[in-house]
Amino acid sequence: MTTDLTVVGLILAASIPVKIVMLLLLLASLASWSIIFSKRRLLVKTKSASDDFEASFWSGGDLNTLYQSATRGKGGSLGMASIFEAGFREFNRVVQQGSVDPDKVAAECSRAMRVAQMREVDRLEQSLATLATIGSTSPYVGLFGTVWGIMVAFIEIGSQQTATLAVVAPPIAEALIATAMGLFAAIPAVIAYNRFADKAVRLEYRYDGFSEEFASILQRHARARAGT
């Protein structure tokens, strides 16, 4: 067995199954960090866009102007603006058809906003299941590599009829590296999943509140039109 006790040397000296486990864990870790960085950017961007839109919306500006501003946005509207755009577009469509029944207008607009909200929530939650999977399975994958490595170590010990530290240490160290890599892949994934899931839920609550408030506003507009 190898006498090179550096991490790289131990990895290179590991058995083929353990090397495969380490490679899988490395790929899982890279995928996890890629998702973490991209999801963090998306959540920050969505929250900032929703904050800006909400400030503009409750400032009392004209809804038509706000709608035109939302539709002119580069890459399409995002977050709360997307829900507003869907609701106001449906409001204009229903009114143009000649219907001014407030209850019908509110129902149609709520339906359109609910669809837009589901699309926005799906965007926020996309890839979170992958983080959860990496976080929950990586320790077990690493443990499998550790068990396999220790099993090979004991076989080597038995074949050499000796159990000195020089014989035992390298294969045991190789095996434990797999556990360390499993934890390295799992811990950031679990932390990121919990944080991102919490932020996504908080944004979803804001979307729910806005949709209800905006549906009420559109219903009042429909009543005003019906009264004219």
Image (spheres, helix red, strand yellow):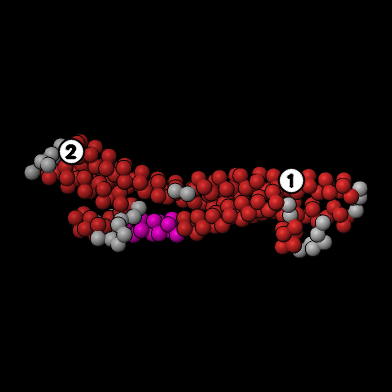
Q: What is the quadrant of the N terminus in the image?
A: bottom right
Q: Which of the 4 image quarters holds residue 220?
A: top left
**Nearest to viewer (mark 1 / mark 2):** 1
Q: Residues within 10 Å of mark 2 (few under 14, many from 20)?
A: some
Q: Nearer the viewer, residue 139 or 109?
A: 139
Q: Amino acid at mark 1?
A: Trp
Q: Is residue 31 visible?
A: yes
Q: Position of residue 196 (x, y in %)?
A: 49, 51
Q: Which mark is residue 115?
A: none
Q: Position of residue 96 (x, y in %)?
A: 12, 45
Q: Is residue 54 visible?
A: no
Please state if 186 lies on the left or on the right of 215 as rendered: right
Q: Amino acid at mark 2?
A: Pro
Task: Tell me the element at label 2.
Answer: helix
State how far apart marks 1 and 2 are (Cα): 68 Å
The range drawn in magenta is 41-54
Residue hosting label 2? 102
Which secondary structure is most common in the magenta stretch?
Answer: helix
- For the point 51% across and 58% down, the residue is 34
Q: Position of residue 97 (x, y in %)?
A: 12, 42
Label located before the other in sequence (1 or 2): 2
Please state if 111 lies on the left or on the right of 4 as rendered: left
Residue hosting label 1? 148
